[in-house]
Image: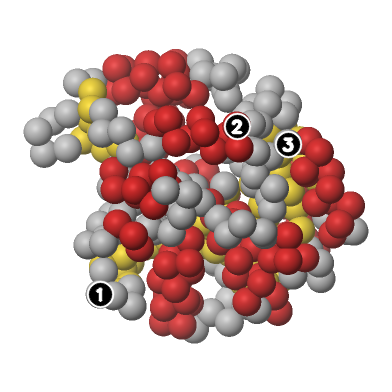
Amino acid sequence: MDKTYSDRFWESPDGLKLHYRDYPGREDRPPILCLHGLTRNARDFSEVAGRLSGDWRVVVPEMRGRGNSEYAKDSNTYKPATYIADLEELLAELGIARFVSIGTSMGGLMTMMMAAHNPSRLLGAVLNDVGPDIDPVGLARISEYVGQGRSFPTWMHAAQALQEVHGGAHPGFDLEDWLAMAKRGMCVQQNGRIAFDYDMSIADPFSQGDGAAPPDLWPAFDALKRVPLLVVRGGLSDLLSAEAAGKMRQRHGEAELVTIDNVGHAPLLEEPEAVAAIDRLLARVA
């Protein structure tokens, strides 16, 4: 469902060449900014952006060190505050003053942090399986695999490796699903082996507790109170608990909370419940 998009680049404040996908859409509507998770890239939003494009312009940046974006010279810059500074350069270059944000995991943290700085810029937000309270169980699980430079001889081996690590989060996946996930998150290297499509050094600040999120994100979340908000939670999530998600809905007052059953961290946003909920949010924005 991945419709036509343009591969474009912008320059970060410290001189890195960063990549984004630009899907065309109606100029009388605000653009949608899709923000990926810690070890992910723009391909994660292929289905989402492809479905929404035409009716909406969709911009999908790849954070430094991921996908086709240049790797950072200093691994200490692999943290949300730096990613947001990079995004500010892109938004200024594109002349985007107001937008809708769809953020998965780390991308959701960035959405809240941007809201804290200037909530009036956000015309709608989707927080996918993340919130101000992050379950330490999920963080510990992520720390076990992030930055491990494994490689595989075939896509089948890569898919099986993903299933071993993430099978509990997607118990309904079949082999084709795991292959698709592998091709989203990995790439063929020059030596012909298949490896994860990110700089392993992103694990450095994360392992030091400096690459996840600020210690108290509730003030940032509260900045979204006047913004149409959708919270998507995986029913099996170990990063966003049911209690934390319920608190988010109650504290916001008008947020919609959708739980995707039999899915952990994180929903793909291609599930029928997520698709319908995103459409409801965008109908409010439109």
Q: Is residue 208 above or below residue 144?
A: below
Position in image of residue 197 (x %, y %): 30, 42
178 lies above or below 69: above
Q: Where is residue 201 in the image (x, y as percent from the top left)?
A: 29, 48
- The residue sitting at the front extreme is 208
Q: Which residue is drawn at 44% across and 64% down?
A: 83
Q: How far apart are marks 2 and 1 (CA)?
A: 36 Å
The residue that disc 3 covers is 241
Q: Hey, which residue is sitting farthest left in the picture?
A: 191
- Please provide percent x and percent y for residue 56: 60, 64
The residue wearing badge 1 is 15
> Which image quadrant is residue 198 in?
top left
In the image, which is nearer the foreground, mark 2 or mark 1? 2
- Residue at figure coordinates x 31%, y 65% from the top left: 18
Residue plotted at (61% across, 57% down): 215
Question: What amino acid is found at the position of numbered circle 1 in the picture?
Answer: Gly
Nearest to viewer (mark 3 / mark 2): 2
Please tell me which of labels 1 and 3 falls first in the chain.
1
Give above or below for 84 relative to 147: below
Residue 218 location in percent, x, y? 73, 60
Q: Can residue 224 be seen in this view?
A: no
Sequence-earlier tag: 2 or 1: 1
- Between disc 3 and disc 2, whose residue precedes? 2
Disc 3 and disc 2: Cα gap in Å? 10 Å
Please give left or right for residue 40 compared with residue 200 in the image: right
Q: Is mark 1 on a helix, strand or loop?
A: loop
Residue at numbered disc 2: 137
Q: Which of marks 1 and 3 is in front?
A: 3
Query: Could you tell me which secondary element the residue under label 3 belongs to?
Result: loop
Q: What amino acid is labelled 2 in the image?
A: Val
Q: What residue type is labelled 3?
A: Ser
Which scheme is used to colour this image of the protein? secondary structure
